[in-house]
Amino acid sequence: MSTTTRSDGRTYDQLRDIMIVYEGLDGVDGSARFGFGQTQSLTSVSGPMEVRPNLEQPSQATLDISVRPLVGIAGTDSKALSTNLKAILAPALFLSHHPRTLIQIVGQALCGTESGSGLGSVGKGWNATLVASLINATSAALVNASSVPMKGVICAVSVGRFPSASAATLVLDPSEAELPHLVGGGCFAFLFSSALPLTPSSPDELPPCSLLWTNYTSSVVYDDTELRQAQALAEEGARKVWAAMKESVSNMERTAQCPAFNRFKSAKTESRVKKDTKNLSESEVDDDKMEI
Amino acid sequence: MAAATTSLSASTSAEDALRAQTFQRLHPKAYLERFLEENIRPDGRELDEWRDVSVHMGSISTADGSALVRLGDTTVVCGVKAEITEPELDSPEEGFIVPNLDLPAICSPKFKPGPPTEEAQVMSDRLNDVLVTAGVVSPSSLCIQPGKAAWVLYIDATCINYDGNAFDATLLAMVAALRNTRLPRARFDEETGRTVCSRKVQEPLQIGRLPIAMTFGIFDGMHVLSDPTSFEEPLLDTVMSVTMDDDGGLVSVTQVGLGVIGKQDILPQCITAAKYRCSILAQQLHTSS
């Protein structure tokens, strides 16, 4: 692998700073914002809840996923992404535990590349890194909601390929600035679950993981060796994402920003929250509650 | 059924067929499992066998290029129409392609009349990705006058019979139709500001790589089925699609679902099988006309 540093000083296998915030949105059961540096997505999860009769399924919950880009109306590529997200989540959730219900997931991109006219433009709205951040935000939102039983957590990263004369130059988590120079790339989503069989390469403190979804495409010819390298690189990155997600779960209550969320907490956690907001007086906290 | 119980003679093959069809409708998964236990599929193929493919080009005279592809029973018709337009502002020296797949109600009872279904939209998006990334038609070859005029190719595919694996069939049809396309020679007239096309001289498109897709499915976490039919498709846990060009180089690999059987990763095995299949299909594409 090339050891040259990238435009922002990262090595080829270094992710940008991962940011996970549990937004505590009002009208939904769980929500989370996930970002690789500036590339961020916000996802909300509601369910299991009442389902319209035409969507009802007798033996499992219905997944209704909609995905919105930052700019413009959702086009064919957003529709395709929500279909892919449904296919990614179906094996990871225990949908048969809640038949005849609806699990509604809404994903929103919080950053977008410049959009073309829609004709002759490939992936201009949804690049691989944004897709990865959306998948991770969905996983975090499902953990935040804690209402849908999950087989495991899905962590995704993107891999990009720079043009080079000899072997492929693969980089993890390409940033917006690097995207125009790539000749290929894709997103890899892994399922981390203790239900999966252990592999010799999995480290002890993490559950075993398996590739769940990928869309690796390149305009330059590549072979399966490169695909394997890309997958291995992505697996390492996904492990780091999993570790970041695990750490964020222990901070979940503290990062919740909505005061109404705090209102229903137990006294013990309320005192912890009050300690954190020690700069705010009691009346100010009450005013925030009133606004809702 | 009452006739079978009252008569002492052996039941006729027609009644057996009806019973088998009823079982297939009511318990599709068990039906497929029974077949796979004997290492055969309901349509008589081996697990790694592909259906016969036939490609006919140039059947639609009103289109600039056309192709008809039959992949087993799945039939896709594709036509290419070229129009002249102004290039996009951020790429003034390039034309572009607009591929689209339509899955109308005529091809299968799964699709109802009305706006394009989710399946058609998703497949159109995937086809767009593959065709543009593989560079089947170089966008700069579609330019007539930088900033003023360029060709836009509307590649419209319609499925007239759906028996599974429409993606493979449609990609083959689109690539064949593009190979068959002939555009009139165009010249931009500076004085009038209009493009003039020759009635007599027609030139074929500058074709780059020819991507060919091969789709596999994993059933029940145990069996790998290549080229699934419309009966097998909804029963698959995982679908893997390998797109290669005619030289055997990979263009795109998509996997939806867990891709392991036991502890073994299936993707490398699929890529090897796809390479072999691709060489056969590429030969067929080159020899058909």
Image (spheres, rainbow, N blue to C red):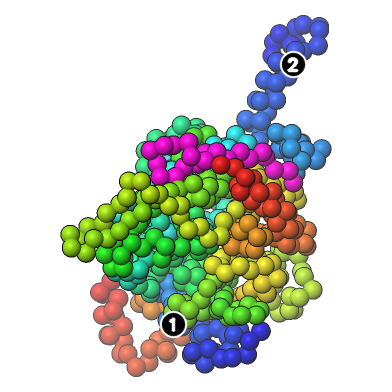
* Residue at 54% in and 67% down: A219
Would you place residue B212 above or below residue A143 in this image?
A: above
Residue B42 in view: yes
Residue B55 in the magenta stretch? The answer is yes
Identity of the residue drawn at 74% across and 37% down: B45
Check disc 2 and give the amino acid type: Ser
Quadrant of the rendered image containing residue B47: top right
Image quadrant where one finds the C terminus of chain B: top right
Please, what is the three-letter code of the amino acid marked with disc 1? Answer: Ala
Locate residue B79, reporting x and y percent. Answer: 43, 43
Q: Does the magenta stretch include residue B11?
A: no
Query: In the image shown, does A5 or B56 lie closer to the viewer?
Result: B56
B83 and A90: which is toward the camera: B83
Name the subunit of mark 1. A
Compared to residue B246, the image places residue B163 above or below, namely: above
Q: Residue at x 39, y 60 (%)?
A: B142
The answer as to whether the residues below labels 1 and 2 share one chain is no
Choose between B44 and B203: the one closer to the eye.
B203
- Say which of B205 and A130 sits in front: B205
User: Mark 1: which secondary structure?
Assistant: loop
- Residue where numbered disc 1 is placed: A177
The image position of residue A155, as x and y in percent, is: 58, 71
As drawn, is B108 to the left or to the right of A52? right
Q: Give the range drawn in magenta.
A: B48-68
* Label 2 chain ID: B
Q: Position of residue B109 (x, y in %)?
A: 50, 32
Q: Name the residue under label 2.
A: B13
User: Where B217 falls versus A78 (above or below)?
Assistant: above
